[in-house]
């Protein structure tokens, strides 16, 4: 049984890749577009992105800072520049 479990992650990754490709094809066909799902999108335009808070300094009550992000500098201005 342990021999069979060793190959399981590879099968799952292939399945997820195939699923992602099919989903991309469906979206491209449905919305008459081409390319990847994220092509042409900017991070600040994505509704659920933390980019606006981290890179632009916008307030977002739903977010808490990551310790790695806080360690970049002591001031928000310097963190944005990092």
Image: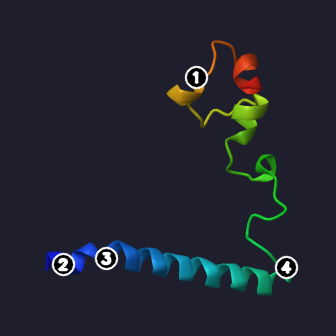
Measuring 63% from the left and 85% from the top, which residue is drawn there?
22
Reading the image, the residue beneath label 4 is 33
Image coords of residue 42 (percent x, y): 81, 52
Give me the C-alpha separation between circle 1 and circle 4: 39 Å
Looking at the rendered structure, the secondary structure element under dot 1 is helix
Secondary element at image label 4: loop
Question: Does label 2 or label 4 sit earlier along the sequence?
Answer: 2
- Depth-wise, is mark 1 or mark 3 nearer the camera? 3
Q: On the image, which quarter does residue 40 sit in?
A: bottom right
Instruction: Bin the neighbour count of mark 2 within 10 Å (Cα to Cα): few under 14, some 14-19, many 20 and up.
Output: few
Q: What's the distance in space between the residues labelled 3 and 4, CA to CA? A: 34 Å
User: Spatial distance from mark 3 to mark 2, Cα to Cα?
Assistant: 10 Å
Distance from label 1 to label 3 (Cα)?
38 Å
Q: Nearer the viewer, mark 2 or mark 4?
A: 2
Q: In this figure, which residue is indicated by the disc labeled 1? A: 70
Location of residue 82 with respect to 73 vertically, above or below: below
Precedes in sequence: disc 1 or disc 4: 4
Under circle 2, the secondary element is: helix
Task: Work out whether mark 1 precedes mark 3 in sequence or the reverse, and give the earlier one.
Answer: 3
Describe the element under mark 3 as helix, strand or loop.
Answer: helix
Please tell me which residue lies in front, 47 or 72: 72
In this rendering, position of residue 16 left or right of residue 6: right
- Point out which mark residue 8 bears: 3
Label 3 or label 2, whichever lies nearer to me, is 2
């Amino acid at each position: 049984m342990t021999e069979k479990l060793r190959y399981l992650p590879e099968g799952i990754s292939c399945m997820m890749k195939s699923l992602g490709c099919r989903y991309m094809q469906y979206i491209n066909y449905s919305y008459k577009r081409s390319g990847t799902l994220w092509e042409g999108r900017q991070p600040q335009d994505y509704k659920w992105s933390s980019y606006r808070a981290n890179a632009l300094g916008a307030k977002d009550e739903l977010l808490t800072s990551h310790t790695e992000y806080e360690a970049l500098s002591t001031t928000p201005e310097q963190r944005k520049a990092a």
